[in-house]
Image (tube, helix red, strand yellow):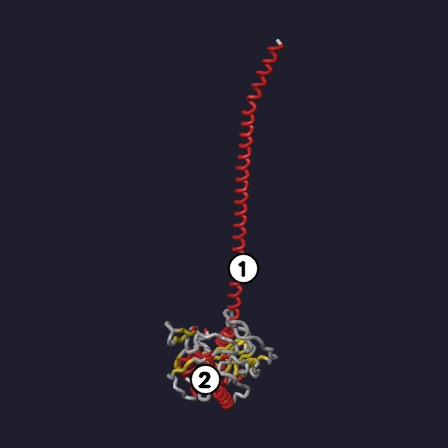
């Protein structure tokens, strides 16, 4: 019996120990399967998290882009609204005439009647309005307009550092230089006209001041042919006389009212097209006989014109205007105001004169842009 029990115990032990490797292998396989399953779940979780992250990131990017687009749209809307206000597009001519320019004079060219005046005796820089006098000096000298002249190093702007599409060495006729100086306010062209004057720029500037004195422009002084020098100063009253005088020159009338002008420069493959700096010459509702713009920061934005409004020849002078479009807007406001009030005249048959009380001059500073 004892022997039987021992054999049974040994047999049972053999079975148990024989099955242990199988159980261990099965346990190991189960563990590996569990680990694989856990890895799959972890990878799925990581993928899901990454997908969620990318979705959130994409959403944030879309929101930023949408927000940026909204800000750009808002800025454009505000800029368009400001432009509309400055251009006087919403003004119908009724009510008081309020101009943005710090200096303004509206005068009937034939009768000399002043329709509107504001700080007309204030002396201030006149920028490229100067070029009207530059043109008159060239034409008074009767120099050949078909004679070719060259842009030299001394014609490069060293005052404001303005750029030009006329390179040093460019060869154009005096007539082309005159056209570009007046219409496109080309500074190198104006300098070249003065440089090729008998006696050079010094004699040219002297001639400018002598003609100013001859015309009775007692508050006017010229220190250069372009207007880049803020020492070129005048008043609205003097400039009205200057415009009236310049209007007598057919060449100046034609050049300053041309919408654009194309020149061919030797050595360049394509022609160069220049546009008039006064956008109003391209507007159908305007009948302009003479025009000149000007800008340096010391002068503000300036504009002088001879134009027909309500059948009357008028001279418009706007100086020291802030804002990119205000000088053009002032011209629009004057035209609309005169057209609106042309049927509402005073007993003496004239539109009632508006005189704005003299304002203190502001301190000018800055550079050309």
Q: Pinpoint residue 278: horizontal percent, then vertical percent.
A: 46, 75
Quote the CA–CA distance across marks 1 and 2: 50 Å
In the figure, 139 relative to 185: above or below? below
Q: Is residue 303 left or right of residue 8?
A: left
Q: Quadrant of the N terminus?
A: top right
Q: Nearer the viewer, residue 25 or 137?
A: 25
Q: Pinpoint residue 311: horizontal percent, then vertical percent.
A: 44, 79
Mark 1: few/some/many CA within 10 Å (<14, 14-19, 20+): few
Q: Secondary structure at mark 1?
A: helix
Sequence-earlier tag: 1 or 2? 1
Residue shown at 54% from the left, 51% from the top: 60
In the figure, 339 relative to 78: above or below? below
Look at mark 2 in the image and give the residue it sits on: 195
Between disc 1 and disc 2, the foreground one is 2
User: Are the residues at dot 1 and dot 2 in contact (C-beta closer than 8 Å)?
Assistant: no
Residue shown at 41% from the left, 77% from the top: 258
Residue projecting furthest to the right: 2
Q: Is residue 236 left or right of residue 255?
A: right
Q: Pinpoint residue 340: horizontal percent, then vertical percent.
A: 49, 75
Q: Nearer the viewer, residue 347 or 369?
A: 369
Residue 71: numbered disc:
1
Mark 2: few/some/many CA within 10 Å (<14, 14-19, 20+): many
Residue 307 can be seen, yes or no: no
In the figure, 82 relative to 32: above or below? below
Residue shown at 57% from the left, 21% from the top: 17
Q: Nearer the viewer, residue 342 or 23?
A: 23
Residue projecting furthest to the bottom: 214
Residue projecting furthest to the front: 3
Q: Secondary structure at mark 2?
A: helix
Q: Nearer the viewer, residue 193 or 139?
A: 193
Q: Pinpoint residue 209: horizontal percent, then vertical percent.
A: 51, 88
């Amino acid at each position: 019996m004892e022997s039987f029990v021992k054999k049974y115990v040994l047999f049972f032990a053999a079975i148990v120990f024989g099955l242990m490797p199988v159980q261990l292998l099965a346990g190991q396989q189960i563990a590996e399967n569990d680990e694989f399953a856990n890895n799959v779940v972890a990878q799925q979780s990581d993928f899901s998290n990454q997908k969620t992250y990318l979705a959130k990131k994409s959403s944030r990017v879309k929101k930023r882009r949408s927000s940026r687009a909204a800000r750009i749209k808002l800025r454009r809307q505000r800029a368009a609204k400001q432009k509309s206000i400055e251009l006087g597009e919403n003004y119908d001519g009724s009510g008081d005439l309020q101009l943005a320019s710090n200096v303004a004079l509206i005068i009937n060219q034939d009768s000399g009647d002043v329709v509107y005046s504001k700080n007309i005796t204030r002396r201030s820089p006149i920028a490229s309005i100067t070029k009207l006098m530059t043109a008159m000096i060239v034409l008074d000298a009767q120099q050949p307009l078909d004679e070719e002249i060259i842009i030299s190093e001394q014609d490069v702007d060293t005052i404001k550092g303005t750029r030009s599409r006329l390179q040093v060495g460019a060869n154009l006729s005096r007539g082309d230089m005159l056209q570009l100086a007046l219409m496109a306010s080309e500074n190198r062209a104006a300098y070249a006209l003065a440089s090729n004057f008998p006696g050079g720029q010094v004699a040219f500037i002297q001639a400018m001041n002598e003609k100013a004195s001859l015309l009775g422009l007692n508050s006017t002084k010229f220190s250069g042919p372009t207007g880049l020098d803020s020492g070129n100063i005048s008043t609205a009253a003097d400039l009205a006389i200057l415009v009236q005088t310049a209007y007598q020159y057919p060449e100046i009338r034609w050049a300053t009212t041309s919408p654009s002008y194309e020149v061919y420069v030797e050595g360049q493959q394509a022609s160069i097209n220049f546009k008039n700096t006064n956008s109003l010459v391209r507007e159908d509702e305007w009948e302009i006989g003479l025009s000149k713009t000007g800008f340096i920061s010391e002068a503000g934005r300036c504009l002088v014109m001879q134009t027909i409004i309500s059948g009357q020849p008028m001279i418009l002078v706007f100086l020291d205007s802030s804002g990119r479009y205000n000088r053009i807007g002032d011209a629009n406001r004057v035209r609309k105001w005169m057209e609106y009030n042309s049927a509402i005249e005073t007993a003496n048959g004239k539109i009632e004169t508006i005189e704005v009380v003299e304002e203190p001059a502001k301190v000018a500073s800055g550079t050309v842009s």
